[in-house]
Image (spheres, helix red, strand yellow):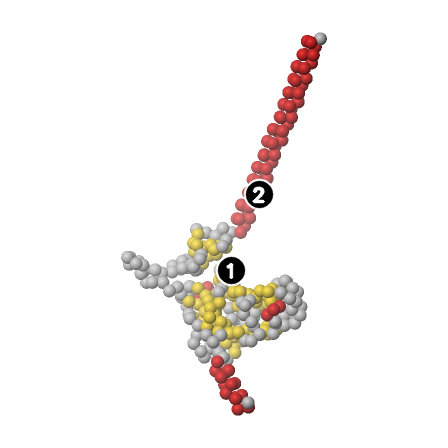
Amino acid sequence: MRSLFLPIMILLILASPVFCQISGEQTIDVNNIAVGLPDDIQVNIDIGVKTIHIIPKGKIEYGKIEIRKYDSVDIQSPPGTAYSYFSLNSNINKSLIKELFLEMEIKKSWMIEKDLDFIKLWRYSGNWSEIPIEITGVTNESILYESNITNISLKDFSYFSIAGDTFKLPKKIENTTKEIECINKTVSAEKNGRCIEFPNSCIPEGWTAVERCVPEEEIMALANIYRILYIILFAVVFFVIYKIYKFRKKDSYLHHRVMEDIFRKLKHHRK
């Protein structure tokens, strides 16, 4: 058995990813989080991830999350231009976590400098696999992203990379000589009721370009106007119904009086 120990250890080391020297490290205590109560954990090292968002399924009494940043890797890099390499490790039982999100912020200046169009999140597990991310907002300086990593266990070190890439578009459109290029101007686009301003004309798949994003204040103002109009319309309809009711009641009363008068005259005539 002892003779097999060394070869097995060598195989395990060779099978694991080889990351270079650690250039940043942070250990975060996660204590006394009640069931269903979200907790935002701030990341203080520059890896592109700003917040780890946890929604517990069970009470987390005591836990730790370890974050390590690496300058580079001694394996094949993921596609595109790497922004960061990092690892996450936690002793929190996966059964206690309902949802786990990474909230990222990437500077526009870095994307422009590297001539990139979008960002991807990769995880290494024998090879690089892409993890879906969503754009959640755009500021004057940055683009905000979010990724749901609930299904990834952090019990063992999970290695990640944030990388930028460009759209793989053909140089020319069929039957024309016009070149396809991303114009560096702000373009508004909508998806699932969310509107975001993108830094160039090459918007991601699934988004629809619109003339402009309507500010939330303007939406609230329009909602208040519609609310007032509905109240006025309701008041007018109620008033009309009330008047009709009063008119019919009065008409019924007059009709009753006329009929009484007719019966009275008939009775008097018979006498």
- Where is 52 relative to 75, above or below? above
Which residue is at the front of the view, 179 or 62?
Answer: 62
Q: Is tag 2's residue or tag 1's residue first in the polypeptide sequence?
A: 1
Query: Does dot 1 land on a helix, a strand or a loop?
Result: strand
- Rendered-image quadrant of the N terminus: bottom right
Q: Which mark is residue 136?
A: 1
Left or right: 27 as drawn, with respect to 260? left
Q: Residue furthest bottom?
A: 3
Density class for disc 1 (Cα within 10 Å; few <14, some 14-19, many ≥20) is some
Residue 25 appears anywhere in the view: no
The residue type indicated by label 1 comes to Thr
Mark 2, other Cα within 10 Å: few <14 / some 14–19 / many ≥20: few
Q: Does 188 appear above or below 11?
A: above
In this picture, is 171 found above or below 225?
Answer: below
Assign a secondary structure to mark 2: helix
Residue 229 in sight here:
yes
x then y, percent, for residue 82: 45, 71
Label 2 sits on residue = 227
Residue at figure coordinates x 60%, y 28% from the top left = 244
Q: Are marks 2 and 1 in contact (CB under 8 Å)?
A: no
Amino acid at dot 2: Arg
Q: Residue at x 55, y 90 (%)?
A: 2
How far apart are the two marked residues, 2 and 1, measured between alpha carbons? 29 Å
Q: Residue 146 appears at what percent x and percent y?
A: 52, 63
- x 66%, y 14%: residue: 262
Where residue 153 sits: x, y (%)? 56, 71
Residue that extends furthest to the right in the rendered view of this protein? 271
Q: Residue at x 62, y 65 (%)?
A: 57
Q: Residue 260, how many percent across, how many down?
A: 68, 17
Name the side, left or right, on which 66 lies relative to 253. left
User: To which quarter of the image does residue 157 belong?
Assistant: bottom right
